[in-house]
Image: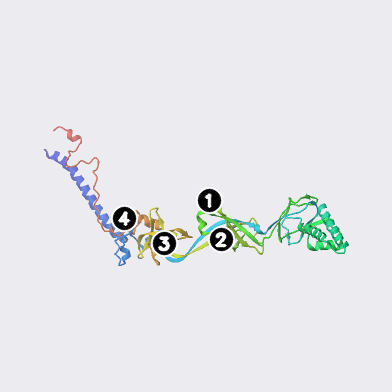
């Protein structure tokens, strides 16, 4: 083989070898420089705390985070503490009149309305106040019957037993028509029957409905007024089926209303509907509320807060617990920059913004309450042998100083290997 032909074959091979060696040296130098420039990726020193060396849940590893990284990703801590366990139920309701203090007013006879003493809805009345007067032929006849019996009883030397029975029956008829006792006595004294029967309010309260008008012919089945005593009102609300174990009759309740935002009203549960609504899976709950000054008006919208005290227990902020479906994970701070994943068992009940811890933590333990999803991801990556790209300072402490083998250089297309003859136009030249 001629010297020229040998030079053509060995030249490309030497060039390829030089490129590969140069790439390997540059990769080694870059890795060394990165290790020097990133001191926060160094393996943390082992702690003397026995809990720090305890194994974490499967698939999780301890995470070390430098102080500046903690500030950058917003890591905050909270404590596991003994707190009261209070189940709080929030719902909404509407103010209603107390149905036990409601009067539907009817006449017990029939006749024509002569005069209205209560002429508009919302008017305040007191028990015994006149509401309207009617002309009733039946009432006039009953008065004359009483006077006739009374005269017959007085005409005899001694009234017979039958006369006394008839007299008491005539008086009783007027009493059943709600004629006051003083009016009956005045009738017996004067002997003059009245042409008008006055209808009086049976209770003190507010007129919610007025259905009577002057000149109307009314009968006993006609409702003329609805009067409500609003010194006590009801707030009707609904609670869900799963909240029923935490609602009992007599339980204290706090009510707030948008119309009175600076005030709170204290009441109590007086009734729980025995039937569950199948559509909404909810139950009607009735709250009784004092209303001495009348500020609570029927139809108002209110927020209901029912608190059920269930003792005390160890709790953490709800944001400290990551619920994966298979297990519940919290990250306990074992030093200023080290966080250990801990599997915890929590109560199925949530107490406002806190979970009750049944196992896994003790009182005084500090846990991560924000950015814990980032720490969770890094912990799982570290357990799997990787780490989160672009997050310097986050390391599990077990792979920081291991040397990784250099990447195998790939063959460059178009570059001939030493064992191959160069394919060019010279290979076809004739000598």
* Residue at mark 1 to residue at mark 2: CA–CA distance: 20 Å
* SS at mark 4 in the image: helix
* Residue at mark 3 to residue at mark 1: CA–CA distance: 30 Å
Q: Is residue 74 left or right of residue 129?
A: left
Seen in the picture, residue 279 relative to 365 is either above or below; the reply is above
Q: Name the spot of residue 162 as percent of width and height, x first.
A: 81, 59
* SS at mark 1 in the image: loop
> Which is more toward the observer, 344 or 139?
139
The residue depicted at 80 percent of the width and 63 percent of the height is: 182
**Can you identify the residue that label 1 sits on?**
281
Q: Is residue 235 left or right of residue 109?
A: left
**Can you identify the residue that label 2 sits on?**
249
**Can you identify the residue that label 4 sits on?**
383
**Can you identify the residue that label 3 sits on?**
357
Seen in the picture, residue 412 relative to 342 is either above or below; the reply is above
Q: Going from the N terminus, do you reach mark 4 or mark 2 first?
A: 2
Q: CB under 8 Å between callouts 1 and 4?
A: no
Q: Name the spot of residue 342 as percent of width and height, x first.
A: 36, 60
Q: Going from the N terminus, do you reach mark 4 or mark 3 first?
A: 3
Q: Quadrant of the C terminus?
A: top left
> Which is more toward the observer, 382 or 4?
382
Q: Residues within 10 Å of mark 2 (few under 14, many from 20)?
A: few
* Residue at mark 3 to residue at mark 2: CA–CA distance: 30 Å
Q: Going from the N terminus, do you reach mark 1 or mark 2 first?
A: 2
> Which is more toward the observer, 214 or 421?
214
- Viewer-side label of 1, 4: 1
* Residue at mark 4 to residue at mark 3: CA–CA distance: 25 Å
* SS at mark 2 in the image: loop
* SS at mark 3 in the image: strand
């Amino acid at each position: 083989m001629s010297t020229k032909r040998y030079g053509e074959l060995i030249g490309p091979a030497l060039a390829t070898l030089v490129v590969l060696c140069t790439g390997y040296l540059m990769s080694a130098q870059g890795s060394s420089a990165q290790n020097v420039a990133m001191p926060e990726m160094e393996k943390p020193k082992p702690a003397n705390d026995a809990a720090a060396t305890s194994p974490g849940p499967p698939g999780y590893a301890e995470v070390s985070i430098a102080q500046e990284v903690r500030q950058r990703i917003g890591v905050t801590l909270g404590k596991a503490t003994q707190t009261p366990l209070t189940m709080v139920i929030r719902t909404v309701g509407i103010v209603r009149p107390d149905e036990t203090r409601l009067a539907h007013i009817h006449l017990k006879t029939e006749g024509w309305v002569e005069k209205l003493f209560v002429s508009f809805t919302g008017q305040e009345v007191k028990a015994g106040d006149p509401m309207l007067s009617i002309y009733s032929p039946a009432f006039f006849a009953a008065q004359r019957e009483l006077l006739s019996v009374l005269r017959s009883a007085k005409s005899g030397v001694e009234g017979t037993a039958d006369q006394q029975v008839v007299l008491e029956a005539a008086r009783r008829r007027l009493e059943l028509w709600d004629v006051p006792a003083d009016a009956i006595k005045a009738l017996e004294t004067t002997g003059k029957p009245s042409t008008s029967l006055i209808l009086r309010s049976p209770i003190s309260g507010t007129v919610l409905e007025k259905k009577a008008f002057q000149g109307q012919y009314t009968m006993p089945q006609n409702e003329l007024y609805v009067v409500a005593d609003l010194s006590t009102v009801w707030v009707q609300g609904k609670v869900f089926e799963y909240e029923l174990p935490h609602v009992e009759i007599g339980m204290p309740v706090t009510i707030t209303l948008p119309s009175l935002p600076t005030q709170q009203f204290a009441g109590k549960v007086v009734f729980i509907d025995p039937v569950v609504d199948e559509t909404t899976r909810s139950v009607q709950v009735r709250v009784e509320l004092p209303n001495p000054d009348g500020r609570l008006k029927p139809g108002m919208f209110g927020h209901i807060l029912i608190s059920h005290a269930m003792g005390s227990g160890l709790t953490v902020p709800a944001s400290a617990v990551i619920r994966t479906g298979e297990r519940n994970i919290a990250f306990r701070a074992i030093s200023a920059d080290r966080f250990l994943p801990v599997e915890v068992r929590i109560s199925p009940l949530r107490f406002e913004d806190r979970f009750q811890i049944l196992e896994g933590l003790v009182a005084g333990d500090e846990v991560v309450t924000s950015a814990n999803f980032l720490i969770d991801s890094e912990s799982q990556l570290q357990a799997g042998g990787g780490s989160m790209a672009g997050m310097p300072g986050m390391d599990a402490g077990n792979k920081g100083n291991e040397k990784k083998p250099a990447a195998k250089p790939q063959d460059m297309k178009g570059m001939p290997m030493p064992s191959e003859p160069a394919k060019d136009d010279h290979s076809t030249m004739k000598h």
